[in-house]
Amino acid sequence: MPLLSMHDAMAQFVRDGMSVALEGFTHLIPYAAGHELIRQGRRDLHLIRMTPDLLYDQLIGMGCARKLTFSWGGNPGVGSLHRLRDAVEHGWPVPLELDEHTHAGMAVAYCAGASHLPFGMLRGYIGTDLVSANPRIRCVECPYTGEQLTTVPALNPDVTILHAQRADRAGNVAINGIVGAQREAGLAAAVLLVTVEEIVDQLPPAMNSIVLPHWVVTAVVHCPGGAYPAYAQGCYERDNAFYQAWDGIARDRTTFSAWMERHVLATADHRAFLAGLKVDT
Amino acid sequence: MSHWTRDEMMTVAAARMLWDRCVCFVGIGLPSAACNLARLTHAPDIVLIYESGTIGTRPGVLPLSIGDGELAQTAACVVPLPEVFSHYLQAGRVDVGFLGAAQIDRYANLNSTVIGPYDAPTTRLPGAGGAPEIAAHARQTFVVMKATPRSCVAQLDFRTSAGFLGGGDERERSAARGAGPRAVITDFGILTPHEMSRELQLTALFPGATVAQAKAAVGWPLISAASIEVLAEPTPNELQTLRDLHSRTHTAHSRPIELPV
């Protein structure tokens, strides 16, 4: 398991046109990795994420994505993701194909992907027009009872990128707090990249917190603050004020592009990104 | 205690529908305020589940997102997200689900996906999230939304979550296992489904609201129940508790975060 720089990890493993899941349910969203993909000018990505959040708003608005697999695309507690909306409603800056699901559907799709099964199964999508909007939501008859059960195709991203509190030098990764579907998304992928707050000689005893063992992890990147403006439990809090401010920044194409140019494209790395925000405040 | 707002009355009315020890699947916004108001007043042992996997959480301030750190820190346990949906919600371990939406129809079906056609929407809304499975599997649901002719419509642009589908026993004949919407809490009063037709009818009004206002706010011909209850206005304790909660929340959410590194 190599320890790579953010630049090298993204350049080496994420290519134009790939399917990429940057997971983390509100907590531990890999912002620094996403920003590096924007800096490197990735195009035609198939982005996968249950809740696109501000990070995918940024990737979509910067023209990195051709397709989005998702289940809830809002700014939590605030309102719309304006760049996602602009792409869907007006094709700006490029048209975006949607593969839309429910949370429960994406959760079983990741579980199926992690298990290398062809589809996930649930009692779900009942009475919803999503079934006609998305022809890949289908059903299967239970061979024991005859019951019709809903199916969704397994999600197996080319690359999954996660952020975690810590890894050890062998590449074992520990996550505390809200774990979302990170473990499933990580094990479903062909390549798993993990950015971490710190690298330690010895991980704390795992107990019930999640450890991704070293042989399922492709590479680790040391990136303190890498989930900001989301949070890393025990390290720093979610910047709710920034999430609220994003509504004003992203509402307008010009304001958005100027913000991205100044804070992401014109900064060399995440350290410089954070330093730039500090100057602003 | 000063006069209350419609928003406050909605929150109080929703909170009063919850009971102690009930297991409640909570959404962000007004449902979260209502559930925590219930916990801080008449239902101290209510079990709050947020879809981020936090179970039995007791936040001191309302979360802005469904997965704020506050929820994990005050939870009885934190489970992976697939487990919340499969082992708890789908398995029938949730008493009450709270839902909101951009549009509702007379059978309490909900749209939170698009306004206009799906492939060329005039307004792209956030989408389904956990709602379709909450609507299907919670033993009952409460819907909370402001009523206008644009939100209470004769025909949904998209059906995201099932209420009573086409009415009558259509829901019972579907694969949905929960009993469906028990009440729709609006900003003028409460609508509840008729026991046979399942069509929503006006059964309760907020103090000061009128039947005429309710009918004007709904985009289909709203039926009134034979007797309409007038809800008690918020008590001083309910109002004070709710205002303190919002005030603590506002302070917490506007506090500058120390940037990492």
Image (cartoon, rainbow, N blue to C red):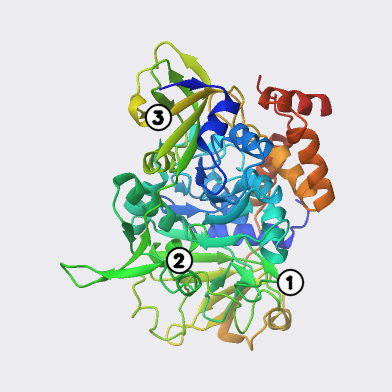
Residue B97 on image: x %, y %:
47, 60
Residue B145 found in image quarter: bottom right
Residue B103 on image: x %, y %:
62, 72
Chain for mark 3? A
Choose between A10 and B237: the one closer to the eye.
A10
Cα separation between marks 1 and 2: 31 Å
Query: Is there CB contact under 8 Å for labels 1 and 2?
Result: no
Residue A94 left/right relative to A178? right
Residue type at mark 3 is Val
Name the secondary structure under disc 2. helix
Chain for mark 1? B
Q: Earlier in the sequence, mark 1 or mark 2?
A: 2
Residue at which label 2 appears: B135
Label number found at residue A217: 3
Residue type at mark 1 is Gly
Few, some or many residues within 10 Å of mark 2 (<14, 14–19, 20+)? many
Name the secondary structure under disc 1. loop
Choose between A229 and B192: the one closer to the eye.
A229
Residue at which label 1 appears: B208
Residue A157 visible in this rendered orientation of the protein: yes
* Residue at left offset 71%, top offset 47%: A62
Chain for mark 2? B
